[in-house]
Amino acid sequence: MKNFFSPDSKQAKEDMDRLMKLYTDEVFEEFMEDPKCSECGKPATQRCSKCKQAWYCTRDCQLRHWKAHKAVCALFKAHKDENSAKEANKTAHEKEKANQALKKKPLIEVLK
């Protein structure tokens, strides 16, 4: 435990964020069995359009399951949105940093 887990809560959060990025739903889909409906258990072909986590065989099953799924769906969606915002901010910051680096160099060096 001491070798792999840190008691520091900030470090634990960073570790979990790294794991979440590593094991996104796209990675798990490769290993997943055929999806089953979250409501009735039959083979499913449709998924929740918001969170992409719950599977359904019909729209009726999705509607029946919505009351139970709503809270979980909101959590998944919020996490996904938060990660998207972080990535967008990170990209914008990297672009700004690159632009600043170009501004500091003399024009002759930039053209080389």
Image: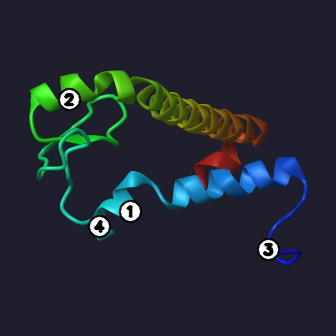
Give the crowd class for mark 4: few <14, some 14-19, many >=20 residues within 10 Å.
few
- Seen from this angle, which residue lies furthest front? 40
Type of residue at label 2? Gln
Q: Residue at x 31, y 70 (%)?
A: 31
Quickly name the residue at label 3. Answer: 4
Where 72 sits versus 106, above or below? above
Q: In the rendered structure, are the residues bearing label 1 and label 4 in contact, judged by CB atoms less than 8 Å apart?
A: yes
Q: Which numbered disc, 2 or 1, marks the residue closer to the eye?
A: 2
Type of residue at label 1? Val
**x, y percent for residue 25:** 39, 53
Q: Residue at x 64, y 57 (%)?
A: 18
**x, y percent for residue 54:** 30, 41
Where 108 sits versus 22, above or below? above
- Mark seen at residue 27: 1
Query: Which secondary structure, mark 4?
Result: helix
Quickly name the residue at label 2. Answer: 62
Q: In the rendered structure, are the residues bearing label 4 and label 3 in contact, judged by CB atoms less than 8 Å apart?
A: no
